[in-house]
Amino acid sequence: MAAPAPPTQDSNLRGMAILSISLVTLTVGANLVCLRMYVRMKRHITGWDDYTICIALALSLLGTVADVYQVANGAGRHIETLTPAQLSEFIKWAFVVGGVGFVISTCFVKISVCIFILRFINKTRR
């Protein structure tokens, strides 16, 4: 049995879903980080954990920008409908910018959590 033929006209609904999820999670994360920084600055208790989470937020913004470029260059569409130039741009943004940004952003989140735990442990020992 032969494989089904690729679609001749692609609607890119999956690309819009990718963008929606990416933008919603960035918005929720940015709001939470802004609220956290507001409270910490109001109480004058900012620390390294707050600064590293801000760096992670900036890097996740880079990942969201990469998602936008990926959708513009073929994410969510069937690979057979992409031109070679679109495929090249998609791979560049998906693996180089998006992948590296995601990994580094995740590392900064983990560092922030570790610093917060150390800060919490030091306060409870006193």
Image (cartoon, rainbow, N blue to C red):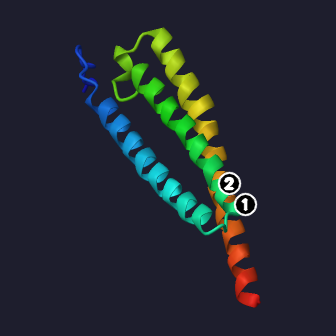
Q: Residue at x 34, y 25 (%)?
A: 77
Task: Name the residue that disc number 2 marks.
Answer: 52
For numbered disc 1, what is the local secondary structure? helix
User: Is 76 situated left or right of 114 in this image?
Assistant: left
Amino acid under label 2? Answer: Thr
Residue shown at 70% from the left, 87% from the top: 124
* For residue 83, above or below residue 78: above
- Residue that appears at 59% across and 37% down: 99
13 is higher (above) or lower (below) than 80: below
User: Can residue 115 be seen in this snapshot?
Assistant: yes
Query: Is disc 2 surrounded by few (<14), some (14 to 19) or many (20+) residues within 10 Å?
Result: many
Callouts 1 and 2 close, C-beta under 8 Å: yes
Res. 48 mark: 1
Q: Position of residue 30 (x, y in %)?
A: 48, 49
How far apart are the alpha carbons under marks 1 and 2? 6 Å
Residue 40 location, x and y as percent? 60, 65
Q: Position of residue 1 (x, y in %)?
A: 24, 27
